[in-house]
């Protein structure tokens, strides 16, 4: 039986907690502000702020931030998502105070040193180039652009132009607006009591009235594009389909659909495109479902001359999901539920999922996953397989 607790503090901070009898704890603190909240002009600001929060606070230098956590065997990192920006520490449970003190400090009290802004802008621009130079990453970024109008379709990190145009005042103003308790979620997963978690959260709590951010209007579209580069030896392609958002019950059908179609070596795509025909080394499907958007992609790497064939087979397998049998559906449910169980072994993964569930509705829905997967019917799968419109992006020589 899972011990889960939830409480909203007087300052508005939502605290989630899952007790575990293992000596490791993850502390994650997230603001309900991510790339989906950005206008075209400020695209990349959530990601830029994430970088700058590690550049010192009023009481800690960059080195001190890392040293305190790593000094007790911990790990500190962060990520920018479409709907949240999250900071997390994983360390021995006995050092929960260290994690809470450091993470609250960098989250709420980041100093944004002027000297770091221009330097970090350059670092992020190198990161943007890195993703562009990676064929698979570039294709996955562009299939999203083929599925959605700007600003949502733009790469999470923004562009070199927008990033280098951001000022310290602009970045700090946005941070102070959205990094406030009432817009934030803290999640602790590990061997600590809820009382201890609440005591520390309240000890390091801050007050602050901010602006609850609103998601920019997300406008779906369908487009097919391609790009050529002379230095490539393999073509990368992606097909994209609009799918249910995370708050829809159809989301659970989408998870089964994607698992059967393109997850792992037993998937339909892997069996048909790689094992049977030898057309690819890699082929898979992936889901990205948020509160305000949802899409599934099929990715493959193949020879330039085989792109059309791989697309045709992938579409055939996609639409062939309408022929899924009751026996195959039952087996898929066992697999998907098992995948979640294996994933939830990691405290980081559980913390992310709890925060995303809370951000889009109620964290307790995380624990009803199996029940909701079990309710998926063949009718639900067939409805997804009936989708005929898709976007595509091909990168080749």
Image (tube, helix red, strand yellow):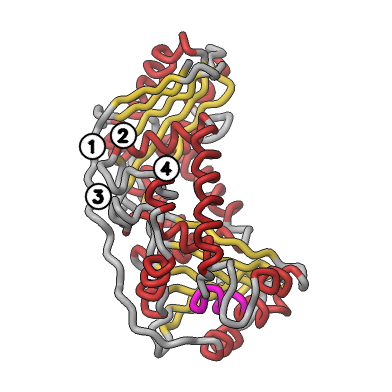
| Picture quadrant of residue 195 | bottom right
Q: Mark 4 = which residue?
A: 287
SS class, disc 1: loop
**Residue 112 part of the magenta segment:** no
Foreground: disc 4 or disc 3: 3
Rounded to the nearest angstrom, the CA distance separating label 2 from label 1 is 7 Å
Is residue 22 visible from the viewing direction of this image? no
Query: Which of these two is toward me, 357 or 324?
Result: 357
Q: Mark 3 = which residue?
A: 218
Query: Which of these two is toward me, 171 or 118?
Result: 118
In the rendered view, would you say 14 is above or below 255? below
Label 4 crowd (10 A; few <14 / some 14-19 / many >=20): many
Label 3 crowd (10 A; few <14 / some 14-19 / many >=20): some
**CB-based contact (under 8 Å), mark 4 and mark 1:** no
- Please give the range of residues in magenta: 102-110
SS class, disc 4: strand
**CB-based contact (under 8 Å), mark 4 and mark 2:** no
Q: In which quarter of the image is the N terminus?
A: bottom right
In the rendered view, would you say 262 is above or below 256? above
Report x, y in % for residue 353.
48, 60
């Amino acid at each position: 039986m899972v011990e889960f607790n939830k409480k909203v503090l007087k300052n508005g901070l939502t605290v989630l907690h899952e007790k575990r009898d293992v000596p490791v704890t993850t502390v994650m603190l997230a603001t309900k502000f991510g790339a989906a909240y950005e206008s075209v002009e400020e695209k990349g600001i959530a990601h830029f702020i994430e970088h700058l929060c590690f550049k010192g606070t009023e009481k800690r230098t960059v080195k001190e931030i890392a040293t305190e956590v790593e000094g007790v065997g911990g790990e500190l990192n962060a990520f920018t998502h479409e709907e949240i920006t999250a900071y997390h520490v994983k360390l021995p449970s006995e050092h929960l105070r260290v994690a809470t003190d450091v993470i609250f400090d960098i989250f709420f009290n980041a100093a944004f040193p002027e000297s770091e802004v221009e330097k970090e802008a350059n670092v992020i621009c190198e990161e943007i180039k890195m993703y562009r130079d990676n064929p698979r990453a570039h294709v996955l970024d562009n299939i999203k652009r083929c599925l959605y109008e700007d600003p949502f379709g733009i790469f999470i990190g923004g562009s070199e132009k927008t990033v280098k145009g951001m000022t310290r005042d602009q970045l700090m103003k946005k941070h102070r607006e959205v990094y406030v308790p009432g817009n934030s979620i803290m999640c602790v997963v590990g061997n600590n009591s809820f009382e201890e978690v609440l005591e520390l959260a309240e000890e390091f709590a801050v007050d602050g009235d901010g602006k609850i951010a609103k998601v920019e209007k997300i406008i779906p579209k369908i487009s097919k594009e391609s790009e050529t580069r002379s230095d490539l030896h393999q073509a990368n392609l992606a097909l994209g389909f609009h799918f249910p958002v995370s708050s829809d019950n159809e989301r659970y059908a989408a998870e089964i659909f994607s698992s059967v179609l393109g997850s792992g070596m037993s998937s339909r795509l892997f069996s048909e495109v790689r094992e049977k025909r030898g057309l690819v080394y890699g082929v898979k499907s992936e889901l990205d479902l948020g509160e305000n958007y949802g899409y599934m992609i099929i990715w493959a790497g193949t020879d330039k001359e085989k792109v059309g064939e791989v697309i045709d087979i992938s579409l055939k397998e996609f639409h062939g999901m309408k022929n899924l049998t009751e026996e195959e559906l039952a087996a898929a449910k066992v697999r998907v539920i098992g995948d979640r169980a294996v994933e939830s072994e990691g405290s980081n993964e559980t913390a992310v999922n709890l925060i995303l569930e809370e951000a889009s509705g109620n964290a307790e829905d995380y624990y009803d996953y199996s029940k909701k997967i079990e309710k998926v019917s063949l009718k639900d799968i067939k409805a997804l397989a009936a989708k005929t419109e898709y976007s595509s992006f091909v990168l080749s020589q």
